[in-house]
Image: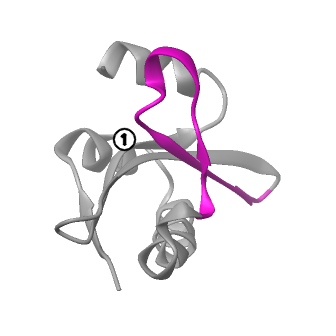
Amino acid sequence: MFRRVITPSAKKSLKRLSRDAEQELLKATEMLITNPHTGEKLHGSLSFLFSFHFKFQNVQYRVAYTIEAMQKLVIIHLVGPRENFYDRLRRLF
């Protein structure tokens, strides 16, 4: 079983979401604790990250995370709606 860690940048992006969307996101990422390879591996300059997708109220959301297998951690770096998500992710890294 893995432990979920939310970085300061992810906390900041979580605050921008509605309370309902935030709760749904935290519930959806529970799946990553048991199986962190559920998301898809990104390509190119972001190939060290995984992206988990889910839909809430007809809006596509993304969660960018890394896996630290030795420490059994899933580190969430950024969350938000799909629109401009990967541009914000590239600026973060």
The residue lying toward the viewer, choosing from 15 and 50, is 50
Mark 1 burial class by Cα count in 10 Å: few <14, some 14-19, many 20+: some
With respect to residue 87, does 62 lie above or below?
below
**Residue 91: percent from left, percent from top:** 36, 13
Q: Is residue 72 left or right of residue 55?
A: left
With respect to residue 42, does 12 lie above or below?
below
**Residue 37: percent from left, percent from top:** 54, 62
In the image, the segment drawn in magenta is: 38-57
Q: Which residue is label 1 attached to? A: 13
The magenta stretch spans residue 78: no
Q: Mark 1 is on which residue type?
A: Ser
**Residue 12: percent from left, percent from top:** 27, 42
Secondary element at tag 1: helix
Q: Is residue 4 left or right of residue 82?
A: left
Residue drawn 30% across the image and 20% down it:
93
Residue drawn 35% across the image and 86% down it:
1
